[in-house]
Amino acid sequence: MTNERSYKLSVEDRGEYLYALVGGEKLTANIAAAYWNEIAGHCFDLKKDKILIEKDFVEGVGPAEMLEMATLVGDLLPNRKIAFIDRFEHRDINELGKKLARNRLVMMQIFDGIDEAERWLLAN
């Protein structure tokens, strides 16, 4: 089966949470919708409510696309806990995404590294 998508996603069941690494050249709301749908499918299949996602996109999105993305995540994964790491540190837009996601009943926190993200995710 050939998979010609404009991002790469690897997902791993780490016991208490789902780990996802997603990346590519340019992030768009459509790309985010595709990978969040895949991640949500894994969460449902594996009965996970905690996600550690590591994003590795060179070019990020703007506020309008972030609003679309947060709405989608809120619709797909309400009441989930998401630890978020951005390898390219698009801090301002990620902070906006965090606020928007929290307004949609998704508990999201941004981290610089996996160790602190995992500690937060597993604390409750």
Image (cartoon, grey):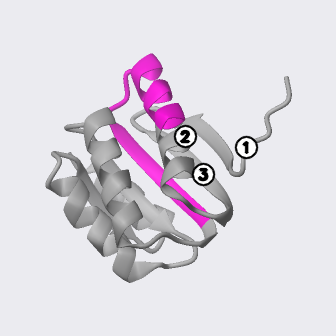
Category of crowding for the residue at label 3, using alpha-carbon neighbours closer than 10 angstroms: few (below 14), some (14–19), many (at least 20): some
In the picture as drawn, the residue positioned furthest to the front comes out as: 64
Left or right of residue 7: residue 67:
left
Q: Position of residue 59 (x, y in %)?
A: 60, 74
Give the residue drawn at x 72%, y 51%.
Answer: 6
Q: Where is 3 relative to 91, above or below?
A: above
- Can you tell which quarter of the image residue 75 is in? top left
Q: Amino acid at mark 2?
A: Ala
The span shown in magenta is: 37-56
Q: Amino acid at mark 1?
A: Arg
Q: Mark 2 or mark 3: which comes first in sequence? A: 3
Label ID, residue 34: 2
In the rendered image, which residue does mark 1 sit on?
Answer: 5
Label ID, residue 21: 3
Left or right of residue 64: residue 13:
right
Q: CA distance from mark 1 to mark 2?
A: 9 Å
Q: Where is 52 relative to 56, above or below?
A: above
